Amino acid sequence: MGRGGRPQIETELRALIRRMSIENPLWGTPRIHGEGELLKLGLAVAQSSVAKYMVKRRGPPSQVWCTFLRSHAPDIAAMDLFVVRRAKAKAEGRYKGRSEDAERNDGIGRMIAAGQSWSSI
């Protein structure tokens, strides 16, 4: 008497699915199955089977907040200092900012008065 249900997929295919999920931690079931990585190889497998044989992960494969801050701290600090220096200079009257372009402002006023939209600029 035989077992019921669908037949198991081959051991080599199961190993390939596991290997793809290990070597590409950002790929999920849709990428391995749905976007055709297995289909490109000519292997037709159900998405549920791919999910079943993928390596289960403990947490998300993305970096954690501390890693992000450690990686980008110098750039964040540099941007913060720029903003502080500009704000301080503006408060002391040393920062003039971008000069006003009266001709441009008049043109925008005429455009709005004529009922034109921003997409016609």
Image (cartoon, rainbow, N blue to C red):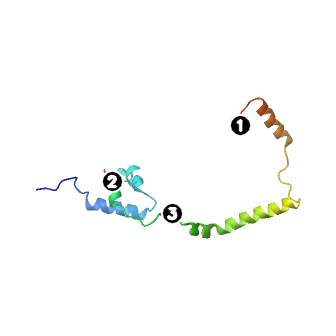
What residue did someone put label 3 on? 62
Residue 46 in the magenta stretch? The answer is yes
Which residue sits furthest right?
A: 93
Q: Quadrant of residue 103?
A: top right
Give the image location of residue 69, x and y in percent: 61, 68
Above or below: residue 87 compared with residue 100? below
Q: Which residues are magenta?
A: 44-50
Secondary structure under tag 2 reads helix
What residue did someone put label 2 on? 48
What is the distance, in whole Å, between disc 2 and disc 3 at their CAs?
24 Å
**Type of amino acid at the residue the image marks with label 3:** Ser
Secondary structure under tag 1 reads helix
Is residue 85 rendered to the left or right of residue 117?
Answer: right
Which residue sits furthest top?
A: 114
Residues 44 and 53: in front is 53
Label 1 environment density (alpha carbons within 10 Å; few <14, some 14–19, many ≥20): few
Contact? badges 1 and 2 (CB < 8 Å) = no
What residue did someone put label 1 on? 118
Give the image location of residue 97, x and y in percent: 83, 54
What is the distance, in whole Å, between disc 1 and disc 2 at their CAs?
49 Å
Secondary structure under tag 3 reads loop
**Type of amino acid at the residue the image marks with label 2:** Ser
Give the image location of residue 39, x and y in percent: 35, 50
Q: Going 59% across and 66% down the picture, which residue do you hit? A: 68
Q: Going 18% across and 53% down the picture, which residue do you hit? A: 4
Figure quadrant of the N terminus: bottom left
The disc at residue 18 is none
Label 2 environment density (alpha carbons within 10 Å; few <14, some 14–19, many ≥20): few
Dot 2 or dot 3, earlier in sequence: 2
